[in-house]
Image: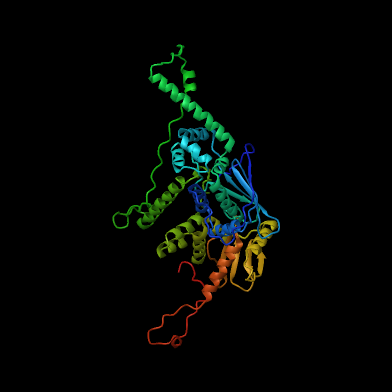
Amino acid sequence: MSRRIPSSKGPVRTFEALPSARGSRAPFAESWWGREWLRALEESSLDSGRLQRGRTYARGGAVGQVTVAPGSAAAPVKGSRPAPYRSRVLVEQLTDRQWDRLLDVIAERAANIAALLDGEMPAALADDAAAAGVPLLPGPRGLDPECSCPDWGYPCKHAAALCYQLARLLDRDPFVLLLLRGRGERELVDELGRRSTARAAAEAAAYAATAGAVPAAPPARASDPAADAFASRVELPPLPAPPVLPERPGRGPALVDTAVPEPGVDPAALELLAADAATRAHHMLAAALATHHADTAPPAPLTEWQDAARLAAARPTREVFARISASCGRTPGELAAATRAWRHGGAASLEVLEEAWSPPTALLERARAMLKDDWPEDIPLPRLRTWRNRWTVEGRGTQLRYGRDGRWYPYTKDGTAWWPAGPPDPDPAVVLTSVLHLEASSRAPAPQRVPEGQHASAEPGMRRTRPPAPGR
């Protein structure tokens, strides 16, 4: 996502901290535009747990004085440390051309201006603005949260608390949203007044023209094609509509039973590669049609080993696994671990499986502090043995590995080998909790079905002592 740089110019409004509403179940937004703001936040979040903690922070009065300026809103948010963190959310500002269209849309109906001044935003106004190409409300991924805390979540709980508090402010005054989009209330009211006056004068002139008062024609002048083209400000024609994303990728050709194989051509392998190419093309088209695609860097090309792990993860059959294992020069165990890593996080997860590296000491210290802050008070924090980017829980077959992508990856031990055990997360407390829970559940006795009329003690219970090896 591109970084939205807030403007240093323009009006600034400051709102005092809202009182604590701890224990309240009232929604943060009653208005439709406030709910749309929260929908943009919640649909872009990567962690519902952080949103829940953000709501708790907001209701508990942790958000201090909120400062709203064109393109950004900021506030101090109290966390577990004595000094509050500085949280901010950035919103993309409208361009001058978009503002011109939006002001025309608002001024077109006098009821729009009256509603805004009365603290309301008509739903029809947002629809008309969208039809004019102006996104009045931010959509998913339209909010860019920042925070000075060590949590790299998107968003962290402190920035989430600020966003929830902003929903309350938007509920009370829709001009807060317009200020975030780039212009203040006084400027907008003055400009809307001028446009309303100009519109009324134009309507009066049109009425006079229909009544017979025809204005004099302008004097003729010599034609200047270049000047005429420049003065017309003709916009470029719109781009063609993007293609429609199919519901599912194509299946590819059937070659095994219908085609006569050429010498050296394996129909089964060719079928597999064609189906895989169709699936990858479907994913690439979906990414190209996604919001903010132009701001997203293209993924790096895969190495042969990465592509082998990807293909084994995408086509999990014994035949595919055996053929890839035999042709890539790796043992079945190595491919099984790589396949599991790929399913949990793609190329970044595969890199964590195979590479040990040394993160900066300050970064690991911040992560330890975040782990301590977020760990439940009623549960003892396990002792961790650190080696490079790996934290191993002493006395347990569990481990956390830190990736170059800024996320923590859970691992469990099976015999003498470490295996990827789940998806990554920027918060080490989230990962450590999940992997310890996984280990505890794998050691618990498996439930038995006891035939009717027999006692549970008739047969000894089966205990599962380790997770199954991948690929089995």
Whether residue 329 appears in this view of the structure is: no
Whether residue 284 appears in this view of the structure is: yes
Quadrant placement of the C terminus: bottom left
In the rendered view, how is the structure colored?
rainbow
The one of 237 and 20 positioned closer to us in this rendering = 20
Quadrant hosting residue 213: top left
Q: Position of residue 428 (x, y in %)?
A: 61, 62
- In the image: residue 112, left or right of residue 407: left
Q: Position of residue 17 (x, y in %)?
A: 64, 51
Quadrant hosting residue 453: bottom left
Report how many numbered discs are placed on residues in the image: 0
Which residue is located at x 39 percent, y 43 percent?
Answer: 243
The one of 217 and 276 positioned closer to us in this rendering = 217
Q: Is residue 382 above or below residue 315?
A: below
The one of 107 and 451 positioned closer to us in this rendering = 107
Q: Is residue 394 above or below residue 300?
A: below
The one of 227 and 298 positioned closer to us in this rendering = 227
Quadrant hosting residue 406: bottom right
Q: Position of residue 143 (x, y in %)?
A: 55, 47
- In the image: residue 169, left or right of residue 219: right
Q: Position of residue 420 (x, y in %)?
A: 54, 64
- In the image: residue 70, left or right of residue 84: left
